[in-house]
Image: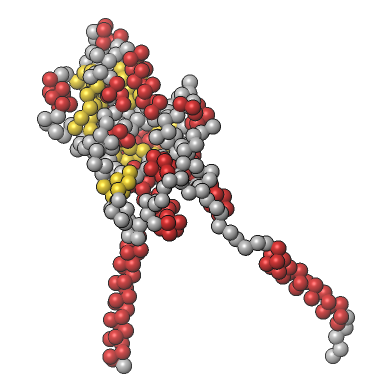
Amino acid sequence: MKKNRRAFIKLAALAAAGLAVAPKAMASGSAAPVKVNATAVHAEHWAMVIDTTKLHTEEEIGKLAKICHSIHNVPSIEGKQEVKWLWSDEYGHTFPEQENPHLAEEVHHRAYALLCNHCEQPSCVRVCPTKATFKRPDGIVAMDYHRCIGCRYCMAACPYGSRSFNWGEPRKNLDLSKLNPEFPTRMRGVVEKCNFCVERLAVGKEPACVEASHGAIVFGDLSNPDSEIRKVLREKFTIRRKPSAGTEPSVYYII
Amino acid sequence: MKMQNGFPIVAGLVIFIGLLCAPFVMGKVVTHEYKAPEIKMPVGEKECIESKEFMREQHMQLLNQWRDWALRDGKRTYTNHAGKEFTISLQNTCMKCHNNKADFCDKCHTDAGVSPYCWDCHVQPEGLK
Ligand code: SF4
Ligand code: SF4
């Protein structure tokens, strides 16, 4: 009797151990190894410097926006339901806290390129209930459109208006013959925004706006003191948008 | 005790049970055996990224994992069980081979009555109209 019970307990322990391992073993049936693309470019903290002495007209910024929007299949809608990843605005709207009545006229007349700032402390990420918006280890604030439930908390939380909601069917406002077949569209009811061209970084390319900017936008690793971007930041005076919001934007502007 | 109205009751019961079973009986006789839909394989391609059996049973789990690996983990290269590498992308890897959604994906999905919402966002190889 005693012996039997012992054997039983031993067996039970074995079975329990087996149970603990089993789900993993079953899952690993498909979990072949994955890794980062060999051609991908890496950074600990991607950031951007926009030289507003070089890039400051609506037309120039509009050109970049057009490229960005066409490769990412961003629908063009006029008015309040507008969807935008890259756009431009005037000084007062861009830097409301750094406004003063005697600012150089010329600075006031520039247009400023705006996009998601890929903040270090992104308020959009903090409020998202589904983790559809999240911060990657390389600093990029990304969207997983599969998870977005369209609650728009993130839009309320972003101090920069960097996010757009798809009120209608986005494909209705796209020229379907000019779609970029390599990149998805979005569905109705999700929030979208600039993704710092993660899909291009993954194959070793710079973001599309950087490439098209003729040197007016510098992109690189903020945590590497030897990087081009850090050199620019050391040499030029730069400001970021709405410092009081405390989100620590990763987009810097040379004024 | 003698059963009153015995015949009508029994007859009624027989008819009732008969009607009750009719769908099963008829179903067996009338319907045809389920046949797997004939899907068109990609021309000139012999192997998928994993075995046929694996893909048949687990392509949905794999796609789920691919999504998370690429999007959330930033890992976009998949090494299959045979050691061959593939770029993780529904649109640019799967659909470049299976370049006809209607003849491949839709066939089984329609039969199985599932309508995955992949195509709400991902662009099918035929393009959108
Ligand atoms: S700019 Fe707005 S959307 Fe972009 S990371 Fe910062 S808070 Fe989030
Ligand atoms: S709208 Fe989408 S991304 Fe924004 S907070 Fe809600 S679930 Fe998150």
Rendered-image quadrant of the C terminus of chain A:
top left
Residue shown at 60% from the left, 61% from the top: B34
Asked if A112 appears above or below A116 in the picture, the reply is above
Residue shown at 27% from the left, 24% from the top: A210
Residue B14 in view, yes or no: yes
Q: Position of residue B103 (x, y in %)?
A: 53, 45
Which residue is farthest top?
A105
Q: Position of residue A157 (x, y in %)?
A: 36, 33
Residue shown at 30% from the left, 24% from the top: A209
Residue shown at 12% from the left, 20% from the top: A235
Which residue is farthest bottom?
A1
Asked if A153 appears above or below A254 in the picture, the reply is below
The image quarter containing residue A29 is: bottom left
Which residue is farthest front?
B44
Rendered-image quadrant of the N terminus of chain A:
bottom left
The image quarter containing residue A28 is: bottom left
